[in-house]
Every structure is written in structure tokens, then in C-alpha cells.
Amino acid sequence: MERSAEQPKTRSGPIEEVEQVVIRFAGDSGDGMQLTGSQFTHTSAVIGNDISTLPDYPAEIRAPAGSLPGVSSFQIHFGSTDVQTPGDQPDVLVAMNPAALKVHLPDLPRNARVLVNTDAFTPQNLKKALYESNPLEDGSLADFQVVKIPITTLNAQALKESALPKKQTDRCKNFWALGLLYWLYDRPLEPTLDWIRGQFAGKAELAEANATALKAGFVYGEVGEVFTTHYKVRKASIEPGLYRKVSGNEALVLGCVAASLLADTPLLYASYPITPASDVLHGLARYKHLGVRTVQSEDEIAAMGIALGAAFAGHLGVTGTSGPGLALKGEMLGLAVMTELPVVVLDIQRAGPSTGLPTKTEQSDLLLGLFGRSGDSPVVVLAPATPADCFAIVIEAFRIAVKYMVPVVVLSDGYLGNGAEPWKLPRAADLPKIDVRHPNEPKGFMPYLRDPRTLARPWAVPGTPGFEHRIGGIEKADKSGNVNYDPANHQRMTELRLRKVEGIAGDIPEAAVEGPSQGDLLLLTWGSTYGAVSQAAKKARAMGRSVGHVHLRYLNPFPKNLGDVLRGYEKVLVPENNTGQLRFLIRSRYLIDAFGMNKVAGQPFKIREVLAKIEEFI
């Protein structure tokens, strides 16, 4: 990347090269920590580092300023080597106030670097953070490298010529801190300056203030003599290609748009606002020019109905939600099973039950997605492994939905949805076409006459002459689709719907093992646990342990070889961010005494947690 004339050029002093760094920005929820972290992430991606992020923020729109519940943080792990998780422990904590320090200090390893905004350590803020003494003065931080900087004061000095009110100039202090971290880790300013110019187009004073604060923090790193060295993290050795940073929710949006183009069929997305799924609605609303239609419905039930209606009308119908929203969609999802229409449901899981912890991650909707409806109502359930994988999984969801005329539930979660990583842009020509077939021969048409290979019924678009037919929630007669109460017909139709979903096992990849195909211990995972467990398994194998790892992206049906794979190991351990839902399924389906590793703290697994559990079993 070319650096412009605005880029300070005065880097000097020793520079140390490091492979990986974990930084956590933490402050009050009004301090702009999510923006600071996302800009650091974007710049790190631009210069070629591998990255993984973990945004963590309160559920309250505005918790009391300076309070412990009001702390917002953003952790980024960046490096020149393979990065699969946001990192177990921060190497650097940027604490903008006492509450941020108190909340995050327990996560720091000994000798970690702590950058504190000393201006915020006032008696009032210390009291709000429940400190009995000032930690900057009482010796309680002796185990850490504490760097005390009056960030608010220095930012105000940099902006003393600004005509903006003091309240607005003070809000620029997050960019001052960002500039300092850019100097410390040898990042260019230009990507963020470009963002500022675009974000504040037409607001010249705001743009100038934020840009000035960013540059001032950078220059302070050079001339402030606070740091004796700064650090360089080289580009990661990754496959050549064009990359961008992508979050899981962004990838779902792009995947939906791509599926519409691959199927040459308009897409309609309907949803009711809910954290952490709302970003998908916001993102898809920007693609009207590609035929995407979005609807913000009055509730979750209506959203499911609108998506199902769109599928009936020949569109790619899709809806999105989180936890309690999926519960509300249950009846309409059952109607999708009965009508056998190709609708896709995106569930960005959060910690439950009920409203639960809206901004925290969990994997506790697996059984709800599989069974949360009346009657025997099988649906296909898929789960992405990483933020970037959300793109591929949603295309796969539409492929299966359209080919088999079946509802598909995609289980992402808050960690994947908000987290980000580099994504190599695929070539459009390499993406799989989605074959949409509407019947065109009225003679012999019957709405429930099935394809003998897939058991899919024909997708006849209503209003097409010669293809008039009825659908609804009442049981259908085999082939004709007429309303039918005959017991034998209900038995047959129930079995056909089940066999259709089970048969998809022959159309999906077999389970692949990382590590030995037989051995002492198999780690079986799904969803967002992939990165931490994969890394832990690699470390265990490097220590000489016989550990395999299978990660499932297909949860209903399971890959057809899964039973054979499971029986190749002495023990099976299932790490999940729930109390054991996949383990329950594995035990009942394969009669294997699988063990669980279960965490329901609203936080993803750490590599060291999984590694310690492996040591217990071997």
C-alpha cells in the first residue's frame, strides 16, 4: 500500500519483529472501542496479517457511564502465522477507564502490557468501578508493564484549534489511542484516514478532528519516549489472491446475494430486528440493485411467513433471527415442512434461554433447530465453522433447499457473526450453480409427485397456467396434494419427508479427520468452536498425543461415515458452548459413550482450556 503525504514518516528507534500479538481495547460503551478495534482490524488485514477478532459489548443500549456493566471491549489477534482464534490472553490491554481495567485485568498474563488513560482515574470513576484505592498507585499492578498516558489531555491539546465543542473533541480520544497503537505495531494510517474521509463526508470539522487525533497519537509514540521500541508483524504466508476482511454476518449477506445470482432467482429476506442478527437485514438492504428485496416485519412469525410466501412464489425466501426468535418461527417452519418449500432460516445464536444474554455467544439452539416444531417435522441443519465459512454455508443451504424442496436452518452464532477474519474472494466462475427447476409441462403435473432420486416435489410457481394447486398445513395426499386424513397416507407422507432429509446424506461430504484416523481421543465439534479446538488438537499432537479432530458442518443429516469414524477412537470428547446437545445426539444415534466439555459463559473456548481437557483424557 502506498502511504500518502499525510502519513507521519518519523519512525525511529529499535524495532522488534514478532509473529503474533493479541490486543484488547476496552473502555466505556461510549468510548468507541468497537470502532477502534474494527479499524485496527481493517488496517491489519490491508497490510496482510492473518486476523481473528472478538467484539464484546453490553446488551444495554447505554449502561451507566464508567460502571462495570458498561464496559465494552474488542480483542484482535493478528500475526504473520496461522491465526484461528482471537487469542487466549491479551498481550496488550488498552484501558480507557478504571472499570475497563477492573473487568479485564483477570484475563491478563503476568508481564502483559497495560496502557491506561490516567485522566479517567478520578475519584468518581474509581468509585464507580468499585475500587477502594487507585490501582495505579497502590502497587496492585506490579505484575504488569503499566504505561500511564493522559490520553484525554493529550487529545484535547491536539484538538485545541478545533471549533468543535469539548464533548465532541473528547470523543476523538479513541482515535488518539488508535494512532498510538498504530505506531507501536508499525501500522499505516492511510486506511483509517480514508475511512474517516468517507464516514464524515460533508462534516469537515469532524473529519479533521478525528484525523488530527489519529495522527497526534501516532506522533506521540514517536516523540513521547514512552516506549523504547516498537514492533513489526510481517505479512502472513497465505494463499495468493485478493482478500478482504469479513465478519460472519457480512459473509451471510454476501452468500445470500451470491446464491440469488447463482440461482438466477430473486431473493427476499424478511426479519424482525434482533441482536446479533440485525446486521444481516441492514447488509442485504444495500443490494436492491441486484434484485434483493428486504422486509422488516412486525414480528418473527410474520417474518417466517413472508419468507415462506416468497418461496411459494418462486423466490429464494430467507429469514434471520436469534434464539427466542427461532422459537417463535417454529409453527411457520412446520408449515414449510408440510408444504415442502425451499426456505432458509438463519439463526445467529446467542446465550439463552428466552432473551438471555443478547450480546453473548452460545450454541444452545441445536436441539431447537432440529426438533422445535409440532409433529415429525425434519429439516436440514447446517453450521458454519468460521466467519468466512458463512458465505459458503449459506450457498450450500440454498442448493440443498432448492434441490430437495426442504427447509434449511443455518446455525451461526454471535461469535461468528460479529467476529472477523481475512477472506479470499472466490472467483464467480468457481462457485457452484444452483439449479432451479420449475415444471413447464402441465400434462401429468401433480404437486406432490416426487423426483424418484431426491424425493423432491415440483416447485410450481402459482399463477402459471396449467400448474394450479393448493398448499397448506393440512396433510396432503401422496402425489395429488389434495387434503387427506387417511391414516395410511399420513404414515407414508411422514416417512417420505423423513427419508428425503435422511437421503441428503448421500449428497454431502463425508466427515474428514484432522490428525490420525484412529487413536486414543477424537474431538468432535460444530460451529464456532472450530478454531480453538483445532489449534488445541494440533498442539496435543505436537506433544505426541494421539488426538483426531472432526468438525461437523452438516448436523442433519450427519455425514454418512460419521459412525465409522467415531468408532475408530478409544474416547470421544464433544466440546460445545451448551450443556451437551451434540453429545446427546451422538450418544442416542450411535450408542457411543461420548464425553462432554461444556461452557455456557457467553464466551468462546480458549485453546488452553481445550488442551487442559485433552490432558485429562489421555
Image (tube, rainbow, N blue to C red):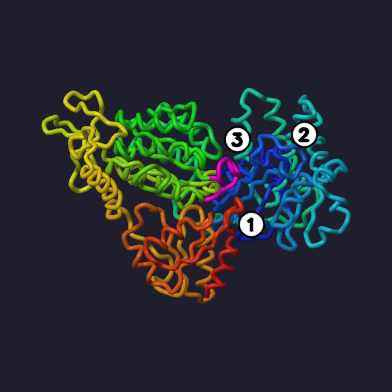
Give the number of the disc on residue 487: none
What residue does disc 2 label?
Answer: 170
Foreground of the two, 518 or 76: 518
Dot 2 amino acid type: Asp
Dot 1 amino acid type: Val
Q: Is residue 372 left or right of residue 598?
A: left
- Considering only order in the chain, which callout, 2 or 1, is on the residue closer to the N terminus? 1
Dot 3: element:
helix
Residue 332, percent from left and from top: 39, 35
Foreground of the two, 428 or 15: 428
The image quarter in which residue 357 lies = top right
What span is in magenta? 350-363
Tell me the quadrant of the picture where the N terminus can be found.
top right
What residue does disc 3 label?
Answer: 195
What residue does disc 1 label?
Answer: 21
Dot 2: element:
helix
